[in-house]
Image (cartoon, rainbow, N blue to C red):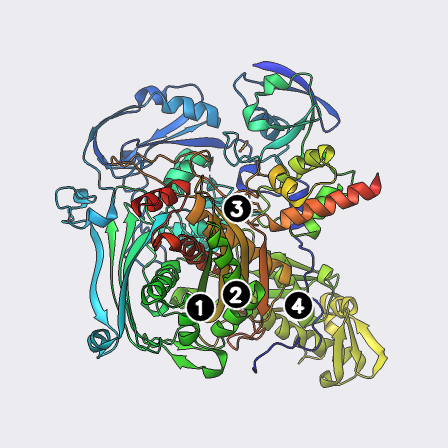
Amino acid sequence: MSNRIISPVGARFVGQSVQRKEDRRLVTGHGQYVDDIKVPGALHAAFLRSDVARGRITKLDVSAAREAPGVHGVYTWQDFHEQFGEAYHVMMGEALVVPPPLAIMDVRHVGDPIALVVADDRYLAEDALELIELELEVDQAVVDYRTAADDSDNVVHAGWGLPSNVMVAMPFMPLAPDLDEAFASAAHVVETLVDQNRYNCVPMEGRGIVATWNQGRGEMDIIASTQSVHETRNFFARYLDIPEGNIRVTARDVGGGFGQKMFVFREECAIVLAARAVRGTVKWIEDRRENLIASGHSRNESGTVRVAVADDLTITAMSVDHVADVGAYPPCPAVLDPTLLTGPYRIPRMGFSMSMVWTNTMGKVAYRGPWMFETTAREIAIDATARAIGVDPVELRRKNLLSFDELPYTSAAQREMVEITPLETLDQALEMLDYEGFRREQEAARAEGRLLGVGVSVYVEPTSMDAPSLHTEGATVRVEASGKVVAYLGTTSHGQSIETTMAQIVADTLGVAYDDVIVVQADTQSTPYGPGTGGSRTAVLAGGAAQRATESLREKVVAIAAHMLEASGDDLEIADSTISVKGTPSKSVTLFEVAKLAYRQAHTLPADVDSSLEATVRFRPTRFPTWSNATHICVVEIDRVTWRPTILRYIVSEDCGRMINPMVVEGQIFGGVAQGIGGVLYENFVYDNEGTPLTTTFMDYLLPTAAEMPHIEIGHLETVSTTNPGGFKGLGEGGAIGSHACVTNAVSDALAPFGIVVTKTPLGPNDIFELVRAAGHA
Amino acid sequence: MHEVALTVNGTNMRIEVEPRMTLADALRDRCDLTGTHLACEHGVCGSCTISVDGRAVRSCLMFAVQADGADVMTIEGLANGEELHPVQKAFQAEHGLQCGFCTPGFVMSVTKFLETTPDPTDDQIRDGISGNLCRCTGYQGIVRAVKRAAAELNGQS
Ligand code: FES
Ligand code: FES
């Protein structure tokens, strides 16, 4: 196989698990998350939210609350009426408007913000909430998205005059002229209904914002727990109709996001408007209940997958009919990407339909791999198909997976698949498990009545996704007067180790020590524009920008050093912050000496030598997306008394191109896999029939703990990408994308002795018990 | 308002609090020690774990007035000057944190856990830290960190 990675000459930090720059402040309690920001005189906010999923507001009296001790303002929709302008995110397009911050006339989901209290502290603000008189006339809520489209009596957005609950419905579209014939003539056609439960981002730090309006200067200062300071700024520039330059958005440390913090929600809008109203600082820190019920929900979609298979196990066609719940007000409805449905497979014909349906539940938001269902649906269907036709799912995959050697391959949806290793990662993962050995062990276990199963999932991940507004990242890199280096990036890290990985790239590219590079990000007043940290964009885009900007800076350093050394720039090399003549190390200057000359004695430079020690680049990869890929395999055992599933082995073989920092790569995989395992086995956000959420604390919404999480074994392949100079690929979302189907398939295989095929999640002990009982075995 | 006298990270403090103020809020707002984090405020996530009179305590479940006379240690008091505590060092060395929001709670819990279980098995570690939630790491780096810290602490004593 070509394209295999060889560390580039001079690489000293890239490829190494160097320790993170972020850690020292974080392990000593000196991180600065948004709630840690203290602004003198700041007021604190709390929202009155609807406890009803659908209803009309018949009384809303805030007069008593306005008189409560310590209260500076109580706001309802009327107070913000016509106080704001355009309310859309560039990434989502102008058609998807963030609704007015506070409910007007009616409420459409539990958690819908109705009023806002601003007081001296949060305790007093919550006291005042109690004094608000609210009466609602309750209407029948639309809760189940599977039936919502046909419910014309109860329409979520009747208040907007909409006739139905269908947001988008795209009729079936065949992507091959002979799709019908392929299904009609296939030896086997297997139909599988894949149904994925509702589970959510749940960062440990909820959302939060500190907004300060400076009336004299006409400036808004925002500190937020966000994944995108720049898009937050641009959003509010439109929203407040003031120039971008009069808004500063910063974030110091952000306690996770996973997609949720990519977007400005209604609450942040309300806080910014309140700050302008009080002409001061308003702080809002979301509590856990708010985060669980009102910070965006995810997954909760289903699809009917049909797979046509020839006698020799060639998959000849696939189709998917997809339905997704987008809730009432989706910050990001995460549209199905049909080009990902065939993923890493050689499936020549494909067709799909899709619909997105409104319900009286919390709106949908992007969550780590918002295109995950495409993998979930396909991988669960492949296992179900293999079972139906009586072959091992690995055999069916092996026959149809793309291998590196046959690329490029153009998929049915006209995607060019390149630089990926699906079959190779499958082989590596199977070897790590000893698949044949496991099947023998399983046979013996089954003979003893044990329920042991193995699941596989193979996927491609479209990192640095192909959305036009996300095509670039910027970097400015500067040698300071001391000879130390600062890289200004457009990113907003929320756990990705960006300060570390980008410093590794800059250090290698310039030839300085890792410790001499500082990365500055998440400040709109000092960093180049970046559309946001998400979509597994950073390695490719920020990495490319950092590298290109540093290369350009290096040329400037070399030009000045060449003048100082009276040598040709071509003859110079830089290592350890020293620029020397190749082969004559004694002829050298340090970076500090170069900086000293550039900053203090620029007059000594010839006119044609630039004294600037700074370079800015906007980087755009050569192609979109940058594919990465992986195979997950896990082994599950189900207890026959408690029906509790336990994961015994979890294996990932992944190919994210050249690794900047293997420790960070593996950390991203561990975390992503935990979220997929959580979604299948533990996490499930539940509404009752009235649309009341039942999982509003960590006692009901169960995140996996260390006791549930397996040890994860990782194998790496490193096929370099040619989309960016470093050969990197993204990988932040893959762990979450692959794990859902993998765990589901393992549970299904464990229950195979009962004739059960599992295609629906969640799969807690109760769910498994119900499956077994329905099959007549419990 | 009540006056509460307590020792925080070796410093004697007197703070004024309302009876309903949690110890976590008091530490964060009255003592300016924001290393103690709040991720649930209902006693499940462990982010707010601190040491009170030598025991690991969830400071979101305790009122500040209950800490009158107590000896409190928060994450800010764990390092010995510039020298990090072995648990802190181990979290750094083993990539036991990503966003870092859960980290102070973990570090404080682990420090206490290793006092009672100095030589833990993997299962004991996983069980011992199962009262703390992390959303980023899948716990793998944290488990490694606990092992490393145990080894270093055992080597020291
Ligand atoms: S904040 Fe105290 S346990 Fe979660
Ligand atoms: S490191 Fe982010 S929650 Fe643990």
| Mark before the other along the chain sequence, 1 or 4 | 4
Circles 1 and 2: CB distance less than 8 Å? yes
> How far is disc 1 from disc 3 in space, using C-alphas?
31 Å
**Which subunit holds the residue at mark 2?**
A
Query: From this viewpoint, is residue B151 visible?
Result: yes
Q: Secondary structure at mark 1?
A: helix
Residue under circle 3? B135
- Foreground mark, 2 or 3? 2
Residue under circle 2? A435
Quarter of the image for residue A519 reads bottom right
Which residue shows up at 66% across the image and 64% down it? A504
Residue under circle 4? A14
**Which subunit holds the residue at mark 3?**
B
- Foreground mark, 1 or 3? 1
Residue under circle 1? A394
Circles 2 and 4: CB distance less than 8 Å? no
| Mark before the other along the chain sequence, 1 or 2 | 1
Instruction: Have a look at marks 1 and 4 and say if they share a chain.
Output: yes
